[in-house]
Image: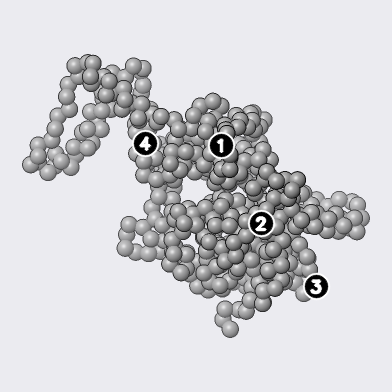
Amino acid sequence: MSFLFRCSLLLAMLFLTSPIPSMAKPAPDDSMADKYAALRRFSHVLDLVQHHYVKDITQKDLINGALKGMLQGLDPHSTFMSADEYKEMQETTSGEFFGVGIEISMENNQVVVVAPIEDTPAFRAGLKAGDIIMSIDGQPTQELSLQEVVSRIRGPKGTEVELTIIHADDKTPQTVRIVRDAIPLISVKTKCLEDNYYWVRVTRFSERTTEELKKALRSAEKESRSAGGIRGIVLDLRNNPGGLLDQAVSVADVFLQRGVIVSIKGRSAKERVYEAKSQKDDISVPMVVLINAGSASASEIVAGALRDQNRALTMGERSFGKGSVQNIIPLPDGSGLKLTVALYYTPNGGSIQAEGIVPDIEVPFEAPRQDAKANSPRMLVREQDLNRHLENSGKKDDQDKNKSDDVKDQLSRDNQLRLALQMVKALPRIRDIKN
């Protein structure tokens, strides 16, 4: 039960049992009175709660609660953030923060996991896209705003949080205890799968994602140069919950030389269009893009652009379907708003809001028999796969064998990646758009 709803119930009972002065009504013919009637009503209710509520509560807390309720009533993604919450939000895209590593959304007054972030406590604990979080440390999430849920799940490194969840394919809740840790901000991983065909995994869109992607591709190009360079790429956006719009645009631009990437339409008649630009380091090899139900927001922008521009073949499962754009608006006291201001559209003019990106080839993930209960691909990425990792003093032959075994293991466990590799090898080489 929300704070505002509880206040409304208490006010209703108070009106029935105590002689409180009635609220004055604006004169019907007074246009100025009509204009400010809602503000007068708010001020009157604020005064009633402050003076008659069973517990002493400050005006600041009441107004913050009212703002949260106002924004939360608009859509699942708009919210009011206190100064502490606003600071936490900024850390998720720019600095280190501690938590369990999940992207969440509010759907039908339920907290839903959009996607667990790889290599985090939540990912290792088995949380999956579509899970519903019912309570945090015993407190029902229906009583909390989305930002309050985020704040309660976060905490100091090494501390434990207890989540009661329901998996999408289960009916019985289960309790999961997760120890908080530092959430890794490395958002791009690469691996040579076979014969200069590369797996490029983008886990989120933070401030340095495009920079990390370009460094990873330069490293791959250097590594494969003696054998003719990169021959194909599987761009893996599965369970990528999104992030910054500008990073989605610049990532798509790495693979496009011209054309629309995404357009944004809000209340104003003016449409904002983001277009690709030709760059010296553009990548023009054949591509397959992998998506699933955990691919949301910025990852859907990238997948939609590459699909609509006929730049890549999309495979996997229908994406999450978050097609709205939020602006972060700082307020003078250090608090802030996350406000939905527009919808975005793929190059073909389609909105994916609540619809998602439907891949060209739909391929459900099939967990290996020994992992039959898993419903998300297991990304077996180790230290040796990370860019700029420290080399071991062992022999190179041993390292090459370990990498080969690791790739075989990953492909054997991931039917979507296995098929994507087969498809990218079969695709004709993509020609320069200019030709």
Can the viewer see residue 402 in this picture?
yes
Residue 215 in the image, given as x and y percentages of width and height: 68, 60
Name the N-terminal-most of marks 2 and 3. Answer: 2
Residue in the image at 64% along x and 47% along y: 375
Select label 4 or label 3 by which is in front: 4
Mark 4–mark 3 CB contact (< 8 Å): no
Classify mark 1: helix, strand or loop.
loop
Whether 189 is drawn above or below 69: the answer is below
| Quadrant (top left, top right, bottom left, bottom right) of the N terminus | top left
Measured Cα–Cα span from mark 4 to mark 3: 59 Å
Q: Which residue is mark 2?
A: 201
Residue in the image at 25% along x and 32% along y: 42
Measured Cα–Cα span from mark 2 to mark 4: 37 Å
Name the N-terminal-most of marks 1 and 3. Answer: 1
Q: Which residue is mark 3?
A: 227
Mark 1–mark 2 CB contact (< 8 Å): no
Q: Which residue is mark 1?
A: 171
> Which residue is most to the bottom?
435
Label 1 neighbour load within 10 Å: few <14, some 14-19, many 20+: few
Select label 2 or label 3 by which is in front: 2
Does residue 131 appear to the left or right of 395 in the view shown?
left
Mark 1–mark 3 CB contact (< 8 Å): no
Dot 1 amino acid type:
Lys
Dot 4 amino acid type:
Gly
Q: Which residue is mark 4?
A: 69
User: In the figure, residue 213 lies in which quadrant?
Assistant: bottom right
Name the N-terminal-most of marks 1 and 2. Answer: 1
